[in-house]
Structure formats: structure tokens, C-alpha cells
Amino acid sequence: MKKKIVLNACGVKSLGGVKLFVEAFEYFSTLNEDIIVLYSENEFFGDLKNQSYENGNVKFIQLTKKRYLHPYLNFLIGKKLMEEINSSSAIIHFGNFGFDTQVKSFIFIQNILPFISRNLKNRLLLFFINRSFEKAEHIVVQLSHTRGLINDKYKKKILQIGEIKQTKVKAIQKNNNIVCFGSNIPNKNFKFMLDVLTSLPNNQKVTIINPPTKLNEFNCVFTETHEQTLSVMSLNEIYFHASEFETVGLPLYEAQELGLKVVAPIKPYSQNFLTNNVYLYHYKNIDDALNKINEAGISENDYLLANSYTENWKQVLDKI
């Protein structure tokens, strides 16, 4: 029997979040099932819509309600749309929490900050997340360190879809160039990164992708697409990372797959990177980070072991 699956992408707007949603969408849209996509951020979904109308089995519906109203969309959207959602086989809520429906629901966790940070915004988000957990049949997580953050009473509902495989890749030609991402999100620790990078002997060897502001002492590059970003990364030998928390840490996997050596802090998300081209430093320790960058720079390898991250959405489909 043909299924109708609702993908609720309302509130998904970060580049990482959109990338993960698109990968899930590509899986479900190739099935012989009817798909309804609920979304709110028009700029991220324009190309997706244009490419997918050819399918015929995919329907896009934009909901423009403010993010803080999303837990109550069941009261705010039209009766006809709500009836259509409630006649579906299941709904998958991306973006950590959903709204009440009469069908099987899945909550996909793609941002762990509400589980860790205790500011007012994240406390409120965690309230809505736990409220969704109570009513959901399943909670979808990517990797085991996220599973560990969820309250024990919900553990039986968890589906872990992230899969990591090791492959052998050709190392980037030795050039000692360093690349990293700029960000004004506190968790990303950009100030710490600058403190480390300004201590290096040759700042012209450093490329910062999409910094909050242009920095004259470094090579700053602003990219608009994922392909452009990967192209810039591939011109460098070392990828430098400093985040305190990551749900997955996709740039680490992408850097490895390109053949870059990775320098990152010792954190739960980085424990999947214990390979010959990864140099882990003590979190926020400038001297240790500099030492690890130096170790990465002097090491010589023709081939590197790389972690490849994928998501097995068939596990979710099997539960619908």
C-alpha cells in the first residue's frame, strides 16, 4: 500500500541543518510514496522545489508562522491541511521538535545545544523538545554521543541512523596551508581560533571561510554554495576546528574525505576521529592546539584514513 509521508522542515535554516534535510529528502523523494514537505525558510528551499516538481509525488507547503509558534502549528494551520497531515502514514519533524498530530511521529535531533546550554532560550527549546518526546513514537539521532544526552525514560524510542565507515584517500599535496570556518556563534569558539592562528609564524598560509567580518591578516574567502566551500577546503593541507559541541561535525568528515589532516579538540564528537591524520588537542588550550598543528604540518603521508559519514533513513522507513 502506498504511503504518504510528511517531512516537517519548518525552522530548519542553518547550512548544516539544510544539508542534512536535503539528504533525507533525496532518499524519501525517490521512493514510490507521496511526500509532503512543510517548510518556512524560502531561500533555502527554492532550488529544491524547482528540481523536485518533476517527481509529481512531492508537494511543498510553506508555513510562515514565527519559530516560537511552531509547537502550536496544529492550531494555526488550516483545517484542510491539518486533515491532510492527519491522514498521512507518518510525520518526521526536523529541527528538534514538532507539533501534535494524530499520526505516528518521529522527532529528528539535529541540534544538541538545548541539551547542554542552560540559557533561557535553550531551556525553552528543551521544554518543547521533551514535550515532543512524550508524544513521539520514535526519536531519531545521528550518533551515539547525542543518544547519551537524552533522558533515560525516552531511550527505548531512539533510532540511531548515523553510520561511519573508514576509507583510504589520497592526501592533499603538502603545502602547510590551514583552513577553518569563521562564526559568531559562541559554541564555535572563533576568538580562540584567532588566538591560535595569530600565533602561527605565517598567517598568509591561513584561509578562513565565511568569517563574521573580513580580517586583513588572513586569507578570507566567502562562499555561497557547498561546492564552493569544498573547493576552497581542498586547497589546504590542515583543517582546524574548535567547537565545544557538535551534533555530528560534518566539516570534519568532509575535510578528511578531501584528504586533509584534522586538528580538533578532545570532545565527545571527535572521538570518532581516532585515525592517523587526526590531531586532538585539549579544549581551549592554545599551546596544545599549536603543537598539534605543528605535528600535522610535519607529518608526511601519501594516503590517509578518512571517516565517511552517512545516514541510514531506511531504519526510519521500516518503522512507518
Image (tube, rainbow, N blue to C red):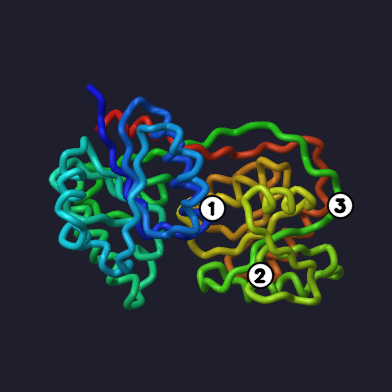
Would you place residue 26 above or below residue 201 in this image? Answer: above
Residue kind at label 3, given as amino acid type = Asn
Residue 124 drawn at (x, y percent) = 27, 71
Q: Which quadrant would the N terminus be assigned to in this image?
A: top left
Q: Nearer the viewer, residue 89 or 55?
A: 55
Within 10 Å of disc 3 (Cα), the crowding (few <14, some 14-19, many 20+) is: few
Mark 2 vs 3: CB contact within 8 A? no
SS at mark 3?
A: loop
Crowding at mark 1 (Cα within 10 Å: few <14, some 14-19, many 20+): some
The residue shown at (15%, 46%) is 83
Q: Helix, strand or loop at disc 1?
A: loop
**Marks 3/1: CA–CA distance:** 25 Å
- Residue at the spot of label 2: 211
Q: Which residue is mark 1?
A: 249
**Is 21 positioned to the left or the right of 122 in the image?**
right
Near-viewer residue (163 or 226): 226
Measure the alpha-carbon separation of dots 2 and 1. Answer: 18 Å
Q: Which residue is mark 3?
A: 175
